[in-house]
Amino acid sequence: MSSYSTPGVGGLFMKIFITAKAGSKKEEVKRIDKNNLSVWVKELPVQGRANAAIEKAVANFFGIPRSSVRIVSGFTSKQKILDIQA
């Protein structure tokens, strides 16, 4: 899989591929390569809580507002695709 960066209406637009690990004892974001991240969050995958925690963790990792990060694929999967607008 590959990511892409293109100019968007509000700035730079990227697609990032995530391997999610919900229910972890630690919260961490680790860059695997240019296009892929592994994200550990404490929240369990119940009622979207883990997805919200993943969006927040990725936003903090890139130093951007959480509103700039959204999951576009993989809502119920460990493999997710996120759109980031910075």
Image: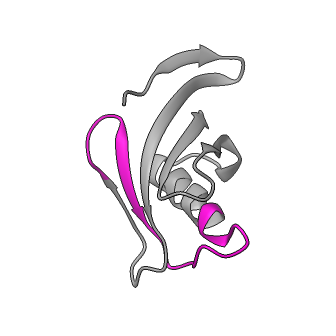
Residue 47 counted in the magenta span: yes
Front residue (pair 82, 60):
82
Which quadrant of the figure has residue 12? Answer: top right
- Name the residue: 55% across, 60% down: 54
The image quadrant where one finds the N terminus is top left
On screen, residue 18 versus residue 45, left or right, reads left
Residue 49 counted in the magenta span: yes
Q: Where 82 falls versus 47 (above or below)?
A: above
Which quadrant of the figure has residue 68? Answer: top right
- Name the residue: 57% across, 78% down: 43
On screen, residue 40 versus residue 58, left or right, reads left
Residue 71: percent from left, percent from top: 63, 46
Single out the residue that lies furthest toward the top. 7
Front residue (pair 81, 86):
81
Front residue (pair 10, 46):
46
Front residue (pair 47, 27):
47
Q: Where 11 falls versus 24 (above or below)?
A: above
Single out the residue that lies furthest toward the bottom. 25
Q: Where 31 falls versus 53 (above or below)?
A: above
Q: Where 63 falls versus 42 (above or below)?
A: above
- Image: magenta residue range: 31-51
On screen, residue 43 versus residue 35, left or right, reads right
- Name the residue: 71% across, 47% down: 67
- Name the residue: 51% across, 48% down: 80
Residue 63: percent from left, percent from top: 51, 48
The image quadrant where one finds the C terminus is top right
Residue 53: percent from left, percent from top: 59, 66
